[in-house]
Structures are given as structure tokens and as C-alpha cells.
Amino acid sequence: MDFTPMLIAIAVVVVLASWFVLHAYNRLVRMRNNVRNAWADVDVQLTLRHDLVPNLVESVKGYMSHERQTLEAVAQARSAAMNAGADLVTRAAAEMALGSAVANLFLTAERYPDLKASQNFLLLQEQLTTTENRIAFAHSTTTRWCGSSIP
Amino acid sequence: MSVPEMTGAASSFAAPSARPPETFFKAQERNRRATWRMSALCVFAAFLMGIPLTLVLSPFLYAVTMAAAEVVNHFSPLPPEFWQISSDLARLAVRVADAVFNQRGVVSPQELIIAAVLIFLPGIALALMLWTGMLLLFRHGGVGGTLASLNAREPNPQDLKELQLADTVQEMAIAAGLPAPKVMLIDSPGANAAAIGTCAADAHIVLCRRLLDDLNREQLQALVGHLVASVGNGDLRIAFTVTSVFETCGLIVTLINAPFGRQSRSTLWRIVRYSLRRGTGAAQSADAEQVAELLADTLDMNSSDIDRFFNSSNPGVIRKALRLMFFPFLFTNLAVELTLWFFLNLLLGPCMALLWRTRRYLADAGAVELTRNPDALESALQSLSDDSATVAGGSWASHLFVVNPGGDRSLGGDSASAEQQRKFLQAWHATANPGVTAAAHNSPSLPGAAVEFARVRQEMMSTAMAAATGNAEATVRLQAFAQAMGVDPAFVHELPNINDLMLAQRGDRAALARVRMQRQSRQRQQGETQRGQTGLQTVSFVSFHPPLAKRAKRLQRMGAHLIDPSRRHSGLGGKIVLAILYLILGPLLLTCGVLMLFVIAMMIGLNLLCLGLWLALIHWLFAVDWASVIAGFTKFVQDVAAALSQRR
């Protein structure tokens, strides 16, 4: 009996199967790297926000000397976020609290036209806005890729 | 900056809203399926176009080869098998043609297949080779040339708005999970944006500076989202392929024209030089840009080199001789151009335009997915439709821009948005009668305002010119108007600079020249906007850009809200008239189309005939033994001379 056609068929099947397996493995590795990068993005943006907040408070102090409560709330929220530790849930909560404190500060700043004319303040506001947006978008990207980023 | 703007996407996650009739996922799915359909349609259209094209090109190639063979044979004889095979094939072709057209004789299926391959293969092979060559050549061209012709510059990090733009691009790139494209700005009076590049890795986003002033941060984000989504969807590759098909057609025409005209030869020389140069420098990409423009120009069907060659009056003797020698080329060129014009404009062009439109809708849906804010994109598109969208230097790439550079009036805009118009009118009327306050003028209804605005702008231009030539009253009025408007950057390009007017009035020649130039460029821009067609758009009567009204409608299906409902045309009466017109004109257009096809078939036949005659002529030229003919003739002359001298 001539075995060659059968051998050829088996060889083709083996080649195809191995190609599929390698392809799937590569895709999984690529997806895992994507998720890691997305996480790194979020981390970088959060750290950047921590660094920007003191500059913001400094630039605003001169104009908004009567709004001590708002400024203190921001400073406290920042220190809480920096010391949140590795637990994702508390960290997420602390970061959200910082976000809302900064939003409150910007809302209050709307009432001070001199502040809004200050180029320094506008630049800082822009930087913080873009950081917030980047966090939000990185959050949405990680959610898209692994279901939910915060369990 | 308000809170919702700042937290942007995050807040839209939290707020539950009524489910829109169609989610952007569905819209994207629908558009991706439509893309497959349109691509299949494009391939089919290209195939249809290829048939007459091969029927013209194959005989041409055969004739040229045989003529060359005859010439070579005269100097060093070719092996007899060559002549045997060629005469066999010719006899076969004649037999098959007889059987097919005259129903005479019988041919076996193999012979039929061989004949078909003989007829279609050379043309197809040539077209495919040229197309692959174009793809390979321009893949590494880069965008430097386009950027240079658009005068694009990097954003300035000191400027707040340009910093916002750079940040927005980064945000959208993070949202899309893509590497951020590079951003460039154009300082042109138009308001448009485009994503250019040959592939996603080389993507550049180009925006007009004026957009940064006209749009707020949300709208800018939506627009950038649209561009990033189109880059991520692979639109750059598709645009590259579409342009390369058109350029291949241009290359075919250039090749046929090459022996006859300087322009074609110089284009070919540029292509050769570009392909030989290595490295990616500015000169390389500038070359690529020029070649692309030249090839796109050849499709414009302006008088080509061959027509000039054959139709010029008072030709010299050499030119007459050349004309006689190469007469069939004229018919070949005519047949090719006719075929290309007919099929590109009526078949392939519209198919590609429809394909491109589907990608635009897909990018719109992608923008909604990225920003979760369909309102922002809709208002951005509306504000874009209000401004004039022409961008200097970007004519051949007009299909790449977000909004039709020729202008899009489907949303009922004029060259300044409604609020700007109102401000303008109020300020102008205030300066006319100093006693009347602005409050006494109610804002007129929109159609009236458009006419009024045009009239007032005319008045303004004439006042400006009067002020420039010394009218004191006009100067005073202009000064008051400038004060009332404040420093409004949107009007910088509408009117001449007030300072220039003052200086011109005092006799400054340079200022007067600047004012005149500004008016001329404004008129030229208006002319361009009215023509509305540049570059690739000329080969398709279907616009490459979907009308903004349709895009707004799709965005509303995805959840955007109606902006300014008074702007919508009901248009029902217009639609009925259009339908009746199509019913009447439809059969007429169809007959015209069929007639065109007949003309093309006739041209193909004529081409075949002329090439056959030409070949026969050349064969006779080389088959006749000229030496013996000349010897015989000389002998004849000698005999006559001898007879004459003997008689005497």
C-alpha cells in the first residue's frame, strides 16, 4: 500500500495546526502586553497628576486667599491618594476623591476673573485637564480589553 | 472651564441616558460590511474597465513588438521559429475571430482559450506591473512633500490653544489604544483638517490654525477623534490604494504619450530619478509629491502631448514624416483616453467615492466611540460647514480632508457662523447711524440674514477701498467698526488690515499693494470655493465627501441632538422635482452611455485596423529588397539616358 498521500496529508494537517497554535499564542502575548501598557499609562498619568497639584495650589493661593477650605481639601486629597498603597479599591477611591477636589477648585476659580487671565494658571489648568482626560481614556481602554480594570 | 468639560468622558460613563436608536457599535458594524460591498463593487468596476483597456493595449503591444522585431530582423536575422510561431498565432487569432464574429468555421475550446489568453494577457500584465510598481515606489515616499506644499508647521507649546491641540491628540490616541500620530498646523484662512500618510505608522494629522479658534475643546476633541479613528481603521492604506489606481491610469497615458511630448518625457524622467534615489530625504518626498501631482494631472484630459503633436499647424518636414510613420499611436491614445474618461468618471470613480464615503461614516462612528459624545462632533461639523474650507496647496489630496474643501452648503451655512453674522451686522449698523443703539436691531431670520450679510460685506469692502484712497468719512466709520468688533481673529482674513488701510490712506504704497492683494486673494478663494472641484474629485461626479447633512443625520441616530432646527431645509419639493427630472433624463442618459460604449468599441476596432495597416507597411518596408529596387531604378534611368543620347 502506498503511504505517501496519507503522509503528505498528515504533514499538511500538522503544519496547519502548529501555525494556528503559534498564532493564538502570539495573539495572547500581544494582548497581555497591551493590557500591561494600558495599566502603565494610567499609572504614569496618576503620578503626573500628583506632581501637578502642588503647583496649582501655589499659583492659586495668591488670588483665592479666602478659599482656604477648598485649598486644604485639595492638599489633603492629594496626600491621601499618594499614601493609598497597593490595594486597588482604596487607591481608586482616593484618586476619584482627588479628581473631584480638583474639579471643585476649578469651579471655585470660575468666580475670579483675574485668575482666569493669568497665563500660568491657564497652563496648569490645561495640564490637569489633559491628565484627567488621559486617565479617563486609559481607564476606558483597559476596561475594553479586560472587562473591568477595577474589580 | 466647567466641570463636565474637564472630566470629559468619565462623567458620560456615569450619566445614564436614553438609549439611542443605533449604538455606534452597530453603526460601525454596518459601515464595515458596507466597505466590503463597496470594495467588491470597485474590483468589479476595475475589471469592467480593464476589458476595453486590454483590448486597446494588447494589439498596441503586439504591433510595437512586431515592428521592433522587423527592424531587428533587418540588421541581424531572428530565428525562423519566431516568425513561424507569430504567423501561427496570427492565423489562429483570425480563425477565432472569424468563428466568433462571422459564425464561420469551427474552433476547439483549447484554441478559444489560447486566443483569449493571447488577447487579454499582455494588457492585464502591463497594467498589473505598472500598478505594483506605483505601489512599491510610493510606499516609501513619505509625507514630507505634501506637508511642504501645505506649508505645515509644528504646534507651538507656548500657545495655549496649540498645547490643547497636542494634548487632545494624545488623549484620543490613548483612548484608541494607538501610537499618537504627529500633529502639524496650517496657517491658512480656511478651516479644515486631514489625516495624511502612506500607512498608520507614518500618520500625520494636519489642522488649520483657524479651527483652534473656532472650536471649543469638546468639538476639537471630537474632530481629532474622527481623524484618529480613521487612521486606526486603516483609511490611510485605502486612500493610498485608491490614489495609486488613478496614478496607474495616468502612467499608462504618459507612457503612450512619451515619444511625442516633452511633458510626458519629463514626468517619466522624474519617476525614474525618484525610483533610483535612495534614502528618505526632503528632496525624495518632494519628488514623490510632484510625480503624484503630474500623474493626477494627466487624467484631466487637457490637450495631451500627442494631440499637440498631431494637430499643430505648420509642421516641419521632419514632423510630417514622423506623423506619417507613427499615425496609429494617435488612435491608440485616443482610444485609451476615451476609455479611461468614460469608465473612470462613470464607473470606477463613483465606486471609489462611495467606498471613501463609507469610511468617513465609519470614522464618524469611531469618533463617537472614542469620545462618547456625538453632540460634540455634530456641532464641530456644523461649525466647519459655516467656515470656508479651502486650503491652499492641498488640491490634489482634496479627498483626504474631513470636510469638502469645495464647500458644503447642505447644512445651510455661509462663510461666517450665525452668531458672527449677527455681531457683524449689529456692529455695522451701529456705525452707520451713531444715534441708534444696537438693541434696536432684532436679529433677522436666518435666510434674510444671509442675503443681508452678503450685501453688507460688499458695502464694507467698498468702504475699505474708499478709505484706502482717502475718504475721511469712510475711515472714521471703519475705525468705529473695528473698535466695535474688538480684536476678532475670525475676521482677519475677511477684510484688509485696518492698520494697512490707515497707512494706505496716508500714501504708503506698500500698504496699498497689500490691501489690493488681499482683495484679490479673497476673490480667488471665492472663485475656488464656487468651482468646488479640485484634484481627485474631478474624476468622479459623486463627491468623495458625504454631505454634512447626512453625517449629521447619522450622528443623530447615534444620540446627538438636533442643533438649530431652523437650519434644516425641508427640501421635499426639491426632491420631487429631482425625481421627475431623473425619470425623464434617465433613458436619455442611458442611451448616451450606450452610444459612448459603441464609440469606444469603434475606437478599439479603428485602433486595431490602424495598427494592422502600420504593421503591414513596416513589413513591406523591410521585406522589399531595396538594394535591387534601387539598382533596377538606376539601371532604368541609365537606359533612358542612353536611349536619349543614342537618339540624338
Image: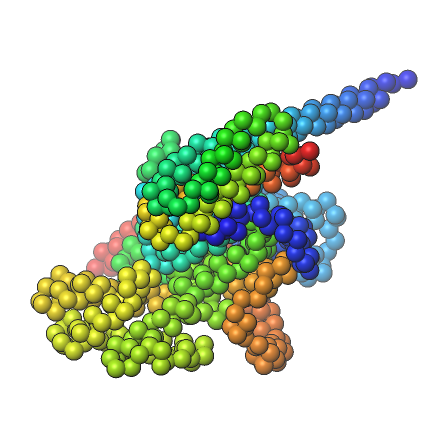
- Residues B620 and B31: in front is B31
Question: Outermost residue, left direction?
Answer: B507
Residue A94, given in percent of the width and then of the height, sits at 57, 34
Q: Which residue is drawn at 58% across and 73% down?
A: B589
- Residues B261 and B615: in front is B261
Q: Residue at x 64, y 45 (%)?
A: B117
- Residues B520 and B463: in front is B463
Rendered view: A47 above or below B110 = above
Q: Residue at x 39, y 46 (%)?
A: A66
Q: Can residue A117 be seen in this view?
A: yes
Residue B503, given in percent of the width and then of the height, sits at 13, 64
Q: In which quarter of the image is residue B640?
A: bottom left
Residue B277, given in percent of the width and then of the height, sits at 36, 33
Q: Can residue B172 be seen in this view?
A: no
Residue B444, given in percent of the width and then of the height, sits at 42, 79
- Residues B281 and B290: in front is B281
Count of numbered tags: 0
Q: In which quarter of the image is the C terminus of chain B?
A: bottom left
Q: In which quarter of the image is residue A150?
A: top right
In-image side of B79 versus B634 (left or right): right
Rendered view: B243 above or below A90 = below
